[in-house]
Amino acid sequence: LLNLEQVNDLIIRRMKTGVLLVDDANHILRINESAWHLIGNPSPNQRDLGQVAAELSRRLYHWRHSGRIDQNPVALAADVPEVIPRFSRMAPNDDTHILIFLDDTSLLSRRAEEMTLASLGRLSASIAHEIRNPLAAIRYSAQLLAESETMDEEDRRLVEIVNNHCTRANEVIENILQLSRRERSRPESIDLNAWALAFVEDYKQSNDIGQDHLRAITQNRQIEAMVDPQHLQQVVWNLVQNAIRYGREPGAVARVVVVARMVSDKGPPVLEVVDRGPGIPAKVAAQIFDPFFTTSEYGTGLGLYLAKQMCESSQATLEYVPVAGGGACFRITLSASATLPARPSPSEKA
């Protein structure tokens, strides 16, 4: 029975839906991690619902006396998502203990978006498979033509164009299939400093960057973040490849840094990929995350779109930030690893 209680407690604490248990005096008896975050991360000593979340206390009072629930979303603190509160008595007609559920509207929107993307992904994957077969035949035929000894230079150039565009079309298909096969995000707590240093070493060992420069910049403090490490690896790998390929002045070497830092003492952790190249014009920057938008002759226009989708699946954001003096910065703002408030003592519960 004790083990079962511990399992139930862990499940409630890790639920994405915020859960609070209050008594008839609006005293918070229990609170899970999500609810603690959604009401603004108050001090563990603050147990009065009216002081911690006045609007939530007002809605609870209205529900107790009228039985009606206000369905309008509300933000219970600064810089937190909007929620829709729900209330439930532990026993009929008994206000001694009330369960409060806080449904994060951003999670509801994200679930709807994931369902839409999943449907589109399956449709796209089906189309991509149908295109791949004739595309392979076209490419194989072009390769056979290129081996002809009687072909003149003009025809060879035409065959080269066919091969180049077959390669590009195949990359588009691979990206579409990657989108359709994308696994659900599995966030976990990571040390962002250690992750950035390990990533740079891994990238250098896997890629010959020649004279180009790639290094990590970390802070002299622990930075913990909640993110899916595999998704983060794919996103940053894509950003670094783009930075090395495009983030350089003509004839110069690429200088790319991966920066792990905190925005402020209480701000979220961020990971940035910064280069010292020509930067991105404002008109182009407004569209770079749109699917199939590209300024490169051989680009697919799906790399940054997929990167942004992967970030959002881990409740992170990806944005482009111009660099003063020239250069580009792609900033990933991550979720901090939340620390649970201490459980109230028996005297506090009483």
Image: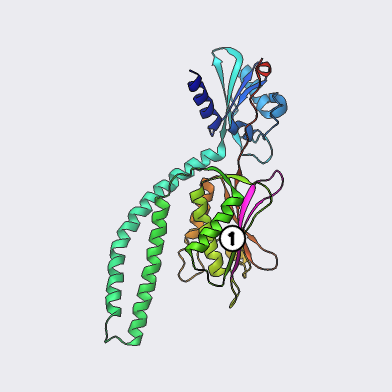
Q: Is residue 107 above or below residue 310?
A: above
Residue wearing tag 1: 286
Q: Is residue 65 above or below residue 128?
A: above
Q: Is residue 262 magenta?
A: yes
> What's drawn in magenta, residue-wise?
254-273
Image coordinates of residue 243 in percent, x first then y, are: 56, 65
Quadrant location, the C terminus? top right
Image coordinates of residue 61 in percent, x first then y, are: 66, 21
Q: Is residue 104 left or right of residue 168?
A: right
Residue 266 vs residue 223, the one in the foreground: 223
Image coordinates of residue 230 in percent, x first then y, are: 48, 50
Number of numbered markers? 1
- Residue 11 in view (yes/no): yes
Q: Is residue 320 magenta?
A: no
What kind of secondary structure does the magenta stretch mostly adopt?
strand
Q: Is residue 4 above or below residue 339?
A: above
Q: Is residue 338 left or right of residue 229?
A: right
Image coordinates of residue 177 in percent, x first then y, are: 38, 55
Residue at image location 53% in from the left, 72% down from the top: 210
Residue at image location 51% in from the left, 19% down from the top: 2
Q: Is residue 90 above or below residue 159?
A: above
